[in-house]
Amino acid sequence: MLNGVMLLWFILTAISVAFVAVDIRKTPESIVLKWGFILLTLYTGPFGAFLYVLGCREPLQGLHERYVAVRWRQVLGSTMHCVAGDGVGILVGAVIGSLLSLAMLADIALEYVLGFGFGWTIFQALFMKDTAGGSYPRALYNTFIPELLSMNCLMAAMVPVSAIAKASVPGSESPLSAAFWFIMSMALLAGFIAAFPINWWLVSNRLKHGMMTVRPKKSNADQNNEHDEGHQMDTGSGETGHGVMASSTVSTFKILQMAVLSFALFAVGIGIALAFTG
């Protein structure tokens, strides 16, 4: 039964990734978010393709700015960006941890460090440094807290799902088995769902960017008209976006509260994993 489910999953994932990779080329989205959707679909199969169509794919030419301005689509872009980048490091860590036969806590630590490191320094700060005036150090500073909170919630769900599933399916600890990759896909999907609420808070408080729109640069007159209509925000390079990080008014104390909450959720996730596999 499980083998049949996994075969169907991998077939649907291959079809979904092929569709998104081809179709997204004509979607007026930033390049980093295009790659993000491809990676998300690679992790989550048809769910990723469904989210791309429902949340980012332009319904009619010229409507992308209005389409992605809706808050939940902004949060979708933010959460997807997090999971796509962190997922690369997490999967690398999971493979290394398996090959080295690391204990659960050591494996979790490795996945966390690699996931956070890649997601923060590359997928967030490096690829999005234009939102920080082109300064990479400033981009690192701006994205540290948002990445930390999102990563903690992602791992809070991933850890128990992957640990319990691997303990329940013989042979799934090996990255050479199909079950290993199927379980990691399910874990990343669970992590995406768990990270969505904190990303809603981050986007709402302008601590993290949301979905963007990238079109050929227009004349100043066209940009001014569109700005006056409230449809988009000019970034000076043909990019328009909603929820881009700028002048958040949330207090440091509130950010600290959310950070403590995210670490508490992460600890609960680890506790559940240990309780069911110990």
Image: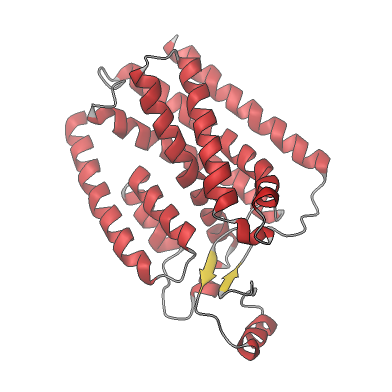
Question: Where does the image place residue 167, in percent across and percent down from the top left?
Answer: 35, 17
Q: Measuring 79% from the left and 41% from the top, which residue is drawn there? A: 254
Please say if 127 is above or below 103.
below
Q: Measuring 26% from the left and 57% from the top, which residue is drawn there? A: 18
Question: Where does the image place residue 236, in percent across and percent down from the top left?
Answer: 63, 75
Quadrant that contains the N terminus? top left
Question: Where does the image place residue 76, in percent across and percent down from the top left?
Answer: 52, 54
The answer to whether residue 173 is visible is yes
Q: Measuring 47% from the left and 31% from the top, which residue is drawn there? A: 158
Quadrant that contains the C terminus? top left
Q: Which residue in the rendered view is the most extreme toward the bottom?
A: 221
Query: Of residues 45 and 233, which is closer to you in this image?
Result: 233
Please say if 25 is above or below 120.
below
Query: Of residues 193 and 30, which is closer to you in this image?
Result: 30
Q: What coloring was used for the rendering?
A: secondary structure
The answer to whether residue 244 is visible is no
Q: Is residue 248 left or right of residue 149?
A: right
